[in-house]
Amino acid sequence: MLPFLRLCAAALAAAAVLAAPAAAQAPVPSPVAPADGATVQTGAPVTFTARGQGTLVVRIARSPAVVDACGAIGEDGGRLDGAASPADPSLVQFTAPAGLAAGEWFWQVGNPTDCSAGPVRRIAAAGSTPAPTTPAAPGAPAATKPSPAGTLPKLARAPIPSRIGTSNHALLVLALGEGSPSVSRKRFVELVRNGARRWRLDARGPVKRVPRLGDAHNDVGFAARLVSRGALGTTTLLRQNYVRVRRVCAASGCRTMRTPAGSRVVERDLALLPDVPWAQGPAHPSSDEYDLETVVLHELGHWAGNLRHTPVGCHDTPMVKGLGPGEWWRSPLDWHYDACDGGRARAASALDVPSLAAPPLRITERVVEQTVVLR
């Protein structure tokens, strides 16, 4: 065992605490307009404005309740991307062209990259005319012609939108020491390489080994022992926290001082459960299959540095807390979650809410800490 090794299964709160100091010190985004408690017309376009640094988003929800460790509210009313105002570059504008459905809403500006969130403001939509909220339900996937025997259809190639997540351009290695009975080697390699390109990651390999924590390799592959309980896949980050230790003496005596000296991620491993009824594609998953491409895109999003999850519901993103059988996200024009059909949102974990249908499984990340003493 490595010296000073401390293992913990950390969720998003740990990742936020361990974020880089520069990001932690960034000013919290500040809402400007509409004023708190403002009233707008149902179905009319609404423009929100705010000030802050980085890639800002506005979240709209029916409840002001915080749903994650970053202090963000939900997104059941939509998530809007911002654009700098031509007259004032420091002012960011967000527009909901279809407006809001009637009733009370809450909105909040935040920066998913540095896990910051501003204060929550209330807004009311008056009127009885129903209006759609964002994100809209996805359109039906385009029909594809049958592929020649032995070939696979083209995958979505477009980069993942910045509203979903950004990239740290990290390196990964395809580790194919273990496989899955429901996934061909060729398809798995193609899905990972394509997903890496979409997240702007550097994919290498393949090599014949299995992802293993502490071997100094950044591997992606099937490895049941690294997957958290109740999850389809888990991205594990090994982070080294550096502490400088020195002895300080004075007339009153000597004492030992410990000073934080920064931290960095020294290893990443993405592990998937092999014994799962995976839908490897290109067909969409059946009602008893889990979509492999969605899980790969989700986990590579964590790999790219996006540790935050989106609440389960009808959201145009692969970064949801849990994925049920028959659900998928492959691009902004090709996705489906049960909540979009009017069904109740799936639970984030099969351990929490019983269901007569096949339960959803989590898609997770964890942080393993290692303390290194510098003398």
Image (cartoon, rainbow, N blue to C red):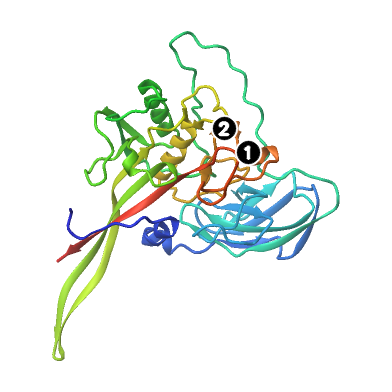
Q: Is residue 55 left or right of residue 172?
A: right
Q: Amino acid at mark 1?
A: Asp
In this rendering, the answer to whether 286 lies above or below 215 is: above
For the image, the number of numbered tags is 2
Q: Which mark is residue 229?
A: none
| Residue 73 as seen in the image, left or right of residue 215 | right
Q: Which residue is mark 1?
A: 338
Residue indicated by mark 2: 326
Percent x, y of residue 231: 44, 43
Q: Residues within 10 Å of mark 1 (few under 14, many from 20)?
A: some
Please state which of residues 218 and 209 is positioned toward the viewer in this rendering: 209
Marks 2 and 1 close (CB-CB < 8 Å): yes
| SS of the residue under disc 1 | helix
Q: Residue furthest right?
A: 128
Q: Picture coordinates of residue 300 (x, y %)?
A: 41, 39
Amino acid type of the residue that numbered disc 2 sits on in the rendered structure: Gly
